[in-house]
Image (tube, rainbow, N blue to C red):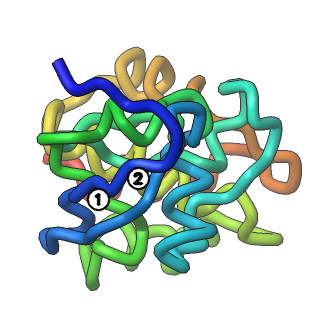
Amino acid sequence: MLKISGNTTLVLNINGEDREIIAKPSDTLLYTLRNQLGLTGAKPGCENGDCGACTVLVDDWPIKSCLMLTVEALGKKITTIEGLNNIPIQKAFIENWGFQCGYCTSGFIMVCHSLSIHHPDADEHTIEEWLQSNLCRCTSYQEIRDAINSILK
């Protein structure tokens, strides 16, 4: 088990690349991504795990980065919205008007991308269950449902 006290140099795998960072034991993954690595796609919203704006993928599973300590990400594969390029759900969000102000969009895209990996034939109940992890204050969610339904088998 790694013991961290004070500032410690760590190597994290972010978007397929090993990145060296300096972390305190109390640093959240959200803080590290935004403030040390300049990856601002994960947004600080509620910062207590309710809104999902900070969602990233950890080993292809959606995780709220405001709740995960940076040190917990050691040895894991972290993917941020910046690490996704031209994946089907991004195009589907555009085609189905799945966003308005855009603040929550990266979190929803991360959840929907993971859903498409783990449940490519998801039924409406599964989709609804997965979408409950994120909040949007601007849209009706129907457009987001339409986007995810358009890419599932």
Amino acid type at image mark 1: Thr
Residue at the image position 50 percent from the left and 24 percent from the top: 128
Q: Quadrant of residue 59?
A: top left
Give the side of residue 37 with respect to residue 15, left or right: right
**Is any atom of residue 136 visible in this view?**
yes
Residue sitting at x 29%, y 59% = 79
**Residue 97: image location, x then y, percent:** 63, 71
- Which residue is drawn at the image coordinates 41% and 52% (left, top)? 110
Instruction: Give me the C-alpha separation between circle 2 and circle 1.
Output: 9 Å
Q: Is residue 38 above or below residue 62?
A: below
**Res. 79 mark:** 1
Is there CB contact under 8 Å for labels 2 and 1?
Answer: yes
Instruction: Report whether 73 appears left or right of 82.
Output: left
Looking at this view, name the residue that lies furthest to the bottom: 86
- Can the viewer see residue 145? no
Identify residue for label 2: 110
Point out residue 129 in the picture as x, y percentages from the top left corner: 47, 18
Q: Is residue 86 above or below residue 14?
A: below
Near-viewer residue (96 or 47): 47
Could you tell me which residue is drawn at 47 percent across and 74 percent down? 37
